[in-house]
Image: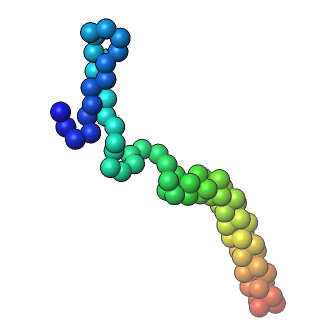
Amino acid sequence: MSYNQIIQYGQGDSGIGSIYADSRYQRGHGGIGCFLAGLFRRVLPVLRSGAKFLGKETLRTGLNIANDLSS
């Protein structure tokens, strides 16, 4: 039997099998990384639309400046 393997028995003589417990570190989802990933998933569409708006305004302003300089 390994360090973190225990045998679990049910009623009678039938064994349920091995289960694993006492993990030294957390595996799977959770923690700060999961929180930040969820936050970025929610914020990214807003940032994308804001960047698109700023890009259009910058282009429009540049065209206006070019028109003013050519006149």
Query: Horizontal placement of 17 versus 64: left or right?
Result: left
As drawn, the residue found furthest toward the front would be 12
Q: Can residue 63 be seen?
A: no
- Residue 52: x percent and y percent? 68, 64
* Colour scheme of the picture: rainbow
- Residue 10: x percent and y percent? 35, 15
Query: Horizontal placement of 52 versus 24: left or right?
Result: right
Quadrant in the picture for the C terminus: bottom right
Of residue 64 and residue 8, the one placed in the foreground of this image is: 8
Q: In terms of image quadrants, where is residue 60?
A: bottom right
Quadrant in the picture for the N terminus: top left
Instruction: Identify the residue at horizontal 31%, vertical 18% (top origin).
Output: 9
Instruction: Identify the residue at horizontal 67%, vertical 67% (top origin).
Output: 51
Query: Horizontal placement of 44 versus 32: left or right?
Result: right
- Residue 45: x percent and y percent? 66, 55
Of residue 67 and residue 12, the one placed in the foreground of this image is: 12
Number of disc labels: 0
Instruction: Identify the residue at horizontal 74%, vertical 85% (top origin).
Output: 66
Q: Can residue 23 be seen?
A: yes
Instruction: Identify the residue at horizontal 61%, vertical 56% (top origin).
Output: 39
**Up-down relation of residue 27 to residue 58 (above or below):** above
Of residue 28 and residue 55, the one placed in the foreground of this image is: 28
**Up-down relation of residue 14 to residue 3 (above or below):** above
As drawn, the residue found furthest toward the left would be 1
Q: In terms of image quadrants, where is residue 49?
A: bottom right
**Up-down relation of residue 45 to residue 51 (above or below):** above
Of residue 14 and residue 68, the one placed in the foreground of this image is: 14
Q: In terms of image quadrants, where is residue 53?
A: bottom right
As drawn, the residue found furthest toward the top would be 12
**Up-down relation of residue 53 to residue 16 (above or below):** below
